[in-house]
Image: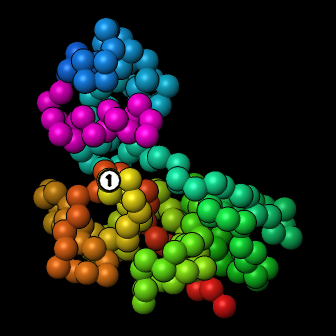
Amino acid sequence: MSIIDDMVHIVMQNPNATAKDIAAELGYAEEKSVYYWLAKAGFRGLKDFRLAVLRRTSPQPAPETTGTYVKDSGESSFPLYSEGNARELPTGLWEYIRKQAGPHSYGVVLTKSEFPPLVSRGDVLVVDPQAPCFQGDLIWVSVKGSKHLVRRYGKAGDPDVFVDALRPGILLLPDTIDGKVVLIVKSP
């Protein structure tokens, strides 16, 4: 887990945490260490970071698996993350993926059968961290270090509610929201 992830957890537990509080929790002698890490992660300050965390829009950690960039015939690349070797996608699928995915999108090859019947082992989730999320959208999130598929619900101005996509009776509180699932490529 990164220092920024640790800071996210601290702010989630105490939204009013000061730089001094965060520094003490992380074991730093001075609060300028907190600002160093915030600047390194691209935040303008603690207020900017706190807003991003509470709105659950950032930070976006990299997928926990190793990444492979898969190239198509047009010499474009698409990051495809998997625990094993990257899966080759059919050539005709690239143009469709480009239309559905944003510039920061990536693919995740599912190596376990944790989410059937919605998705199965070998399927590829195309995740867009910058896509707008609406009622009922399928979202790829991290909860206590493991990945989950959830549905997002909420009214304007109210906090979002995240429901397990496979067991709708279970509410989840994500540590991070990795992005909206904009496309599922089913395995053959």
Q: In the image, is residue 162 part of the stretch drawn in magenta?
A: no
Q: Nearer the viewer, residue 79 or 99?
A: 79
Tell me the residue at 45%/47% (across/down): 60
Residue 159 in the image: state x and y as whole percent: 16, 57
Q: How many marks?
A: 1
Q: Nearer the viewer, residue 112 or 47?
A: 112
Q: Is residue 31 left or right of residue 102?
A: left
Secondary structure mostly seen in the magenta stretch? helix
Residue 146 in the image: state x and y as whole percent: 39, 59
Tell me the residue at 62%/64% (across/down): 82
- What crowding class fits label 1: few (fewer than 14 Cα within 10 Å), some (14-19), or many (20 or more)? few
Q: Quadrant of the C terminus?
A: bottom right
Q: Is residue 177 visible?
A: no
Tell me the residue at 40%/34% (across/down): 4
Q: Relative to 100, is 104 above or below?
A: above
Q: Which residues are magenta?
A: 1-17
Residue 111 in the image: state x and y as whole percent: 57, 72
What residue sits right under mark 1 in the picture?
144
Q: In the image, is residue 3 part of the stretch drawn in magenta?
A: yes
Residue 153 in the image: state x and y as whole percent: 22, 70
Colour scheme in use = rainbow
Which amino acid, by three-letter code, is at mark 1?
A: Lys
Q: Which of the 4 image quarters holds residue 80?
A: bottom right
Tell me the residue at 53%/54% (across/down): 63
Q: Residue furthest top?
A: 30
